[in-house]
Each structure stands twice: as structure tokens, then as C-alpha cells.
């Protein structure tokens, strides 16, 4: 499938998708509710999930005129790696549940767009399957389990596959209470009535059953098959994962990771300036300002609110990336204006791959690229590397 097909009218949506929000709506209609809520939901009352978006929207641009913006540049570097635009596809667990071999599809779309894909520990497609589909290096996101042999095996496999960067997720000492996942049965126990409701919901999505559940390779977790080769997707695996997250991990464990990994190390889940300084002190090459997309502790700051203080705390000692709430090229420009080197997107690519597969992700990245070009042109900035706070107007608290 090529990108032209994603521009055709989609009768379930009523129009050709023109934004990440359009892809969200397509994904909502095409996925069983359990899976859509897994992508879409947050923790507790989803206050932080909403704040990630609302506080980005509250930032305004300074529209500037009569500046030469005939040539606009989106290219940048992150950790020495050239990117065609300051964007990275974030790690998304269970990705291959949304479309057949979704991680491979997204990784290929990212490579064609000239950006980086980050593979999740909890991906359906294993590291080796993703590597075989690509020509350029990709990143690997790591959870440290109580049984460190699993992490050590994953690190060795990532190194063998040519990954350049390990993204260590550090905000999962315990798993956040995600009410949507409890209600629809991904976590917790299902009553018989809810089991029936879930079965009926899946039955109403025959295309998903045909394409994903029954089509192609079995739905197993390619990176952790050694740990749970017989796990049924997703409940058995979810319970095992939740029991294996290690709340004893500390800053001292970064030395253990460094001893096994010769590449770059990025810490994902930094919200506090003191933690950012600790990351620098322990040798992190970059930090990702992240609240796990509002899926961990609720009522914490939005990532765009937390970003400036973290940028100030680390200075030039490490690179600062941001995720959480990014849905458009306008959002990316706002984050860059406040000091981020690049942004990660998770939900948007998950929506796009669920809706239209590889072509959907490729089209989404073109949308974001075009939105960034328009935003630069109307703020009078010719190069993303020249963005700073002078391009925006912050809300008054």
C-alpha cells in the first residue's frame, strides 16, 4: 500500500484523515474497545492525561511577518544521529495487537521518513524481526525486571541487532492504576458479565479478528518469549509483567546497565529537575521529560510544564527530549521553543497503524512535517535549531 491510498475518503470517518485526531477516530472505530482504551487511556481520573494536551494548547505562537522563510529546515541531530525532523516514534507496548506486525510497519515508515523508531520491551514483534526490516539503526526501550537475566538477554539482543541507544524507562517502580484497563479486563479480574461484554465487543470487529487475531504470525511477545512462551495475549502476560517490574531499581543500577551496554543511554520518565541532575551525574546521555503519557501517577505536572525547568537544570550536559500530549507539528514546535531537542510520539503512531497500517504511519508523519513547516513559516523561523521562547507566548498562571 502506498500513501496515496490514505488520502481517499474513509466512509467510517466521513472524510480523508487530515490530522492525528482523525486517525484516533479511525482507530476507535476499528479496534475492539479493550485495545483502543489501552492506547487511549491514562491512570486514575486521567487528569494528567488531559493536562498534557490542555497545557500545550494554552501556549500561543507569536506570528511574525516579512521574514525570509522561503527555505525552512526541519533537520536536526539527536545523540549524534541525523533526523529529517525532530521526531521519534516512542515505544508502545502491545503494538502488534493494533495491526498485523505493527512494530515492523511503524519502524519502516519511520525509516522512510528519516527518523528513529524505538522498540518496546513489550512489543509483539521481537528485536530481530524489526532489525531485519530496517537498514538504519533503531533504539530499544528497556524495562528492568526482577529477574535481571531477562534484561541482560534483551540488552545482548539489542546490541547484536545494531541498536544504538537504550531507553531505560524509570517511572515504573509500580504500575499506575489505569481504571479503563480494569474496567475492560486487561488488568484485574473479569466478571462473567464483563467477559460476555468483551466477547461481544470483539465479535463486532470481524476485520480486526481476521487481520490481527487470526492473520499472519501468532500473537506472542517477541522480546520476552523466553520468559513466558505459553502466555495468552494479553491478560496472562500483563499479570506477569506487572509482577516483574522491579521497585528496587535505583540510580546505582545505571552502572550495571553501562557495564553491559556500550551505546547511548537515555532515561525516560524524568519530571523533576533534581532527578534530571541525578541523571547527568550518573552518565545519562539524554533524558526524556515524560509522565508516561499520563498513565502512571495522576495529578503530576504536564510534560510541557515540566520541560523548561529540566532544560535549565541540565544545561548543555545532556540532551533533553519530551513526550506526552504531542499530537501535531504545532505541538512539536512549542516543545522545541521551550528547549526540547526533539519529541517522541506514541499514541499518534498507534492510532495511525491501527487505522491504516504502514501507510497510515507514513501519512501521519507527512502531516506532522507539513504542520511544522507551516508553523515555522508563520512564526518567521527558518530553522528548527533557531527556535527559542521568543516564538511563543506562555499563559499567565
Image (tube, rainbow, N blue to C red):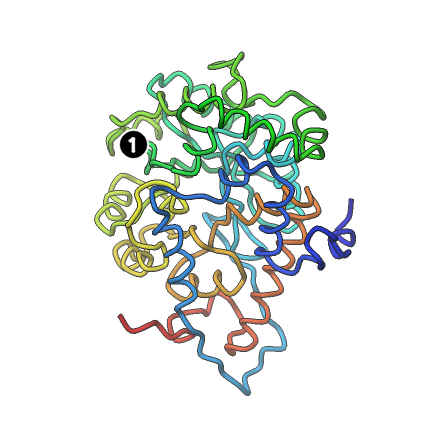
Image position of 212 (left or right of 257): right
The image shows residue 260 at horizontal and vertical percentages of 39, 25
Residue in view at x 48 percent, y 65 percent: 333
The image shows residue 314 at horizontal and vertical percentages of 28, 54
Crowding at mark 1 (Cα within 10 Å: few <14, some 14-19, many 20+)? some
Front in this rendered view, residue 71 or 327: 327
Quarter occupied by the N terminus: top right
The image shows residue 259 at horizontal and vertical percentages of 35, 26
The image shows residue 153 at horizontal and vertical percentages of 45, 19
Image position of 82 (left or right of 394): right
Quarter occupied by the C terminus: bottom left
Name the residue tied to disc 1.
Answer: 173
Is residue 12 visible in this depiction of the protein? yes
Front in this rendered view, residue 31 or 310: 31
Residue in view at x 71 percent, y 59 percent: 15
Residue in view at x 54 percent, y 71 percent: 375
Amino acid at each position: 500500500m502506498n500513501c496515496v491510498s490514505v488520502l481517499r475518503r474513509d466512509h467510517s470517518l466521513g472524510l480523508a484523515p487530515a490530522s492525528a485526531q482523525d486517525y484516533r477516530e479511525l482507530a476507535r472505530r476499528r479496534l475492539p474497545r479493550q485495545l483502543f482504551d489501552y492506547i487511549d487511556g491514562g491512570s486514575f481520573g486521567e487528569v494528567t492525561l488531559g493536562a498534557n494536551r490542555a497545557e500545550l494548547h494554552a501556549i500561543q505562537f507569536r506570528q511574525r511577518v516579512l521574514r525570509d522563510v522561503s527555505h525552512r529546515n526541519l533537520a536536526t541531530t539527536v545523540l549524534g544521529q541525523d533526523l529529517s525532523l525532530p521526531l521519534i516514534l516512542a515505544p508502545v507496548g502491545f503494538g502488534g495487537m493494533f495491526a498485523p506486525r505493527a512494530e515492523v510497519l511503524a519502524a519502516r515508515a519511520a525509516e522512510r521518513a528519516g527518523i528513529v523508531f524505538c522498540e518496546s520491551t513489550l512489543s509483539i514483534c521481537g528485536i530481530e524481526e524489526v532489525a531485519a526490516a530496517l537498514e538504519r539503526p533503531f533504539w530499544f526501550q528497556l524495562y528492568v525486571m526482577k529477574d535481571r537475566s531477562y534484561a541482560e538477554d534483551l540488552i545482548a539482543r539489542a546490541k547484536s541487532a545494531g541498536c544504538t541507544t537504550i531507553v531505560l524507562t524509570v517511572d515504573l517502580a509500580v504500575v499506575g492504576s489505569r481504571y479503563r484497563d480494569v474496567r475492560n479486563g486487561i488488568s484485574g479480574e473479569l466478571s462473567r458479565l464483563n467477559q460476555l461484554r468483551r466477547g461481544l465487543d470483539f465479535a463486532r470487529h470481524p476485520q480486526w479478528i481476521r487481520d490481527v487475531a487470526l492473520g499472519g504470525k501468532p500473537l506472542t511477545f517477541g522480546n520476552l518469549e523466553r520468559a513466558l512462551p505459553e502466555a495468552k495475549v494479553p491478560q496472562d502476560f500483563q499479570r506477569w509483567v506487572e509482577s516483574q517490574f522491579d521497585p528496587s531499581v535505583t540510580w546505582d543500577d545505571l552502572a550495571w546497565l553501562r557495564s553491559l551496554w556500550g551505546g547511548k543511554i537515555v532515561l525516560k520518565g524524568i519530571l523533576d529537575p533534581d532527578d534530571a541532575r541525578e541523571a547527568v551525574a550518573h552518565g545519562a546521555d539524554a533524558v526524556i521529560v515524560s509522565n508516561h503519557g499520563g498513565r502512571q501517577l495522576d495529578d503530576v505536572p504536564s510534560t510541557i510544564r515540566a520541560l523548561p525547568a529540566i532544560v535549565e537544570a541540565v544545561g548543555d550536559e545532556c540532551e533533553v527530549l519530551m513526550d506526552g500530549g504531542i499530537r501535531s507539528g504545532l505541538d512539536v514546535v512549542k516543545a522545541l521553543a521551550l528547549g526540547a531537542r526533539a519529541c517522541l510520539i506514541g499514541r499518534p503512531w498507534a492510532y495511525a497503524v491501527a487505522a491504516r497500517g504502514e501507510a497510515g504511519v507514513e501519512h501521519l508523519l507527512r502531516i506532522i512535517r507539513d504542520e511544522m513547516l507551516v508553523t515555522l513559516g508563520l512564526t518567521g523561523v527558518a530553522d528548527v535549531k533557531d527556535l527559542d521562547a521568543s516564538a511563543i507566548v506562555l499563559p499567565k498562571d
